[in-house]
Image (tube, rainbow, N blue to C red):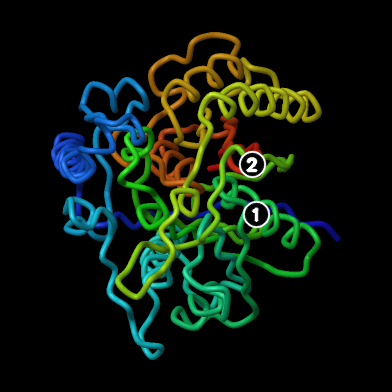
Amino acid sequence: MSFTPAITGTGVFTPEHVISNAELVVAFNAYADKYNAENADEIAAGTRLAKAHSSEEFILKASGIEQRYVMDKSGILDPEVMHPLLRQRSDDEPSIMAEMAVDAANKALVAAGKTAADVDAVICAASNLERAYPAVAIEVQDLLGIRGFAFDINVACSSATFGIQAAADMIRSGSIRSALVVNPEICSAHLEWRDRDCHFIFGDVATAILIERQEAATGPYFKIRSTRCATRFSNNIRNNNGYLRRSRPDGMIDRRDMQFMQNGRKVFKEVLPMVNQHIANHMSDEGVTAPNLKRVWLHQANKSMNDYIGARVLDRDPAPGEQPNILQDYANTSSAGSIIAFSKYSEDMENGDIGLICSFGAGYSVGSILVERQD
């Protein structure tokens, strides 16, 4: 017997701290001035490059970002630190990622009219996990009081859509009744805030989606019509050192390539065709055409990329609201971006309306979910 999976609730945890572009530019430029002064002789001799200033105009033009939410603001804006100062928690305390995920998960459960007793599995899908084991998902499961099982997955910016496919497949097969897919993203912890080319890209957030058998829904929901995932190896987006590693007095290695790295030109050139073809094939195989799509919720990486993809998916420039962006407020939140957009811009959908959730990023990876509103 096969069951139809449905998204019945979503939740978003938003950190309390906000960094505007103006604040970020002041901090970065102070760091750049300090760096240039400390290395003045080498810069004058031509053996070291000077750090150029950033600007609000540069950031907005390059990304469409106006601000970002972060778990810690003080460290990022301190020219002597330039990374978040996240307190080391004891093993007896909830981890920071689990705490974020639980907040989003509880909101998703409330939205669906369900409790932890209605959930059979937890999938923690995120681009960077703060530890290898025990799985953050199992900690979330324990904090929520959920029976069943839990596991972590990482497919970078596509983690959420890959997690949705995994949950949907298990529901279709009948092995579970429901699953929470949580996406706690502390992207500020793997960003190199001292690099002008990328210091503005990321923010922090956590999202959650409750996926159930269609017949278990107690209110309006989104039937998952189809899911599709694809990967192709590339080094053009890479993080060699995981969650949060910086230079320290104890001698930890401080290499630029140990944090978030991206060859933006190659990514734009190679990822966009892959995403466009992936979506086109998915829609064609499911008999969905551009006029059938009411809305497209894309990964929030870069406004230019989203506008480009949205225009090709819809065969025209998207009308206001058809391809919503939350990038200007949240910045790039990796796997959570498309889920924030879906959570905030889906309630006005009407019965029978079809939409597409799509994420893409390092790997390369692409995940797409075709959903249909049901009242």
- Name the secondary structure under disc 1: helix
Q: Position of residue 107 (x, y in %)?
A: 38, 62
Residue drawn 49% across the image and 54% down it: 258
Name, please, the residue furthest toward the top. Answer: 316
Residue 176 location, quadrant = bottom right
128 or 222, which is in the foreground? 128
Q: Is residue 16 visible?
A: no
Which mark's residue is nearer the viewer, 1 or 2? 2
Indicate which disc residue 235 carries: 2
Which corner quadrant holds the N terminus?
bottom right
Amino acid type indicated by mark 2: Asn
Q: Position of residue 70 (x, y in %)?
A: 28, 54
Instruction: Identify whether 143 is placed above or below 190.
Output: below
211 or 133, which is in the foreground? 133
Count of marks overlaid on the render: 2
Amino acid type indicated by mark 1: Gln
Indicate which disc residue 214 carries: 1
Please tell me which of labels 1 and 2 falls first in the chain: 1
